[in-house]
Amino acid sequence: MQTMIQRDEYVKRLIARRENGLIKIITGIRRCGKSFLLFRLFYDYLIESGVRKEQIITIALDDDTFVQYRDPGLLSKYIREKIVTDEMYYVLIDEVQYAITTEELKNTENIRLYNVLNGLMRLRNVDIYVTGSNSKMLTRDVLTAFRGRGDEVRVYPISFQEYYSFAGGDKSDAYEEYAMYGGMPLVLTRKSDAEKMTYLRNLFTEVYFRDIVERYDIELPDVLGELTDDLCSSIGSLTNVNKIKNTLQSVKNLQVSNATVANYLDYLIESFLFHNAKRYDVKGKKYFEYPSKYYCADVGLRNARLNFRQQEETHIMENIIYNELLYREYSVDVGVVEIAESRNGVRSKKQCEIDFVVNRGSRKYYIQSALSTSDPQKMETEVRPLKHTKDFFKKIVVSKTSMKSWTDEDGILHLGLYEFLLNENALEL
């Protein structure tokens, strides 16, 4: 077994962006490995490529040693004082959201940190890399704030392929462990099940919720908690703000407005805890405003939030596939196909769902996630909407089987789950 999780794909993405004249913005949920990627893996790469230590300026703004540099003016002064030659300097700043105030977020044109980093980029011998754990500060307005000089690299919790490369052993056993405890890197350092469970639970209360409550001045933390529980228990199910509000009122007896629910949902997404997958009309080529689906950034966090009581294998597998597609840099929507039916001479139209409509560049795929397709009726249910897309993009069914991939008479590719997760080129088979 390896002693360190290798995140080669992310290192490659950073290397490809080296000295490209843009500010590299490494985003993702807290504790997913951004700091390790930048300060250990990428730092080691720079040293191995011949860069001297003096040319690498590292600052961790979540470390009390560097707390004074949360002031952008002092941060700029500190960095500029270390640039003493004409050699290329690499500036690595961790958790830059600490240098952005809540007031500044109201007008992103006046965020001092952005002005400081843009100023540093005018120096010809500076290459900047920053990490952050909030998309509102670092993604939503990034092109405007950095004057078009921002280049995002999104980091996710450990993929199954990364996990399996580290853990090894039987694939099915490794998957069951991964489906239970997910891919937060430090989970792998916990020896017992109890330690893993405690660590994941504490991430929610001690890290994520505390960040959200403090950053957004949350007035109803109980509502935030119940909303999170509701999203975790309904991953892969269609929902919307009004439905969530009604659930909180009827089941939890919490009186809350639609606006509050919508804001709290935004905060959970901005903190990278959840992803929102919108519904896309395949034939009409348009998006539906609502309802949509929410997936948890990590299934281990999802399970921990529910005290490991709700182990819906179908939904967990769907969430893992969704996260894997994001890791591979696909854009992912939920597909809707309208199918005309005729019963007893009465014609009607029915909306059928395709789990994922996947795009990257000019490539497009339709993917169904199916725990099992051994039942012919279940198989027909899965492939029916794929047959009615009326186009020639690739259609795929991923099921939890160890069978080798095969293509049926309708041209639909059938993939085993492990093959899909372990082979990054599986969609091209």
Image (tube, rainbow, N blue to C red):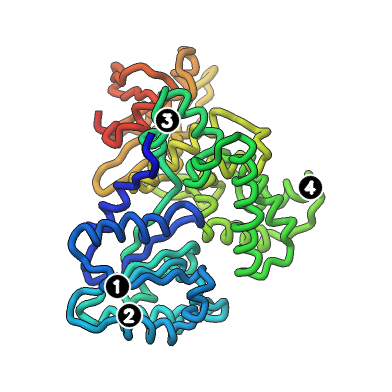
Instruction: Tell me the residue that label 2 is attached to.
Output: 118
Counting from the top left corner in percent of width and height, residue 129 is at 33, 67
Residue 137 in sight here: yes
User: What quarter of the picture does the C terminus occupy?
Assistant: top left
Report the side of 212 relative to 298 (left or right). Answer: right
Q: Residues within 10 Å of mark 3 (few under 14, many from 20)?
A: many
Q: Are marks 2 and 1 in contact (CB under 8 Å)?
A: yes
Q: Earlier in the sequence, mark 2 or mark 1?
A: 2
Residue 311 coordinates in the image, percent (x, y): 61, 31
Mark in front: 3 vs 4: 4
Identify the residue shown where x is 40% and y is 78%.
Answer: 114
Q: Whole-Å distance between the Cαs marked 2 and 1? A: 8 Å
- Which residue corresponds to mark 3? 368
The residue lying at 68 percent from left, 66 percent from top is 218
* Helix, strand or loop status at disc 1: loop
For mark 1, what is the residue?
A: 149
Return the residue at label 4: 252
First in residue order: circle 2 vs circle 4? 2
Left or right of residue 80, residue 246 in this image: right
The residue lying toward the viewer, choosing from 221 and 52, is 52
- Residue 368: image location, x then y, percent: 42, 30
- How many numbered dots are placed on residues in this image? 4
Q: Alpha carbon of mark 3 to alpha carbon of mark 4: how far?
A: 33 Å
Task: Determine the image quadrant of residue 223.
Answer: bottom right
Determine the CA span between mark 1 and mark 3.
Answer: 38 Å
| Earlier sequence position, callout 1 versus callout 4 | 1
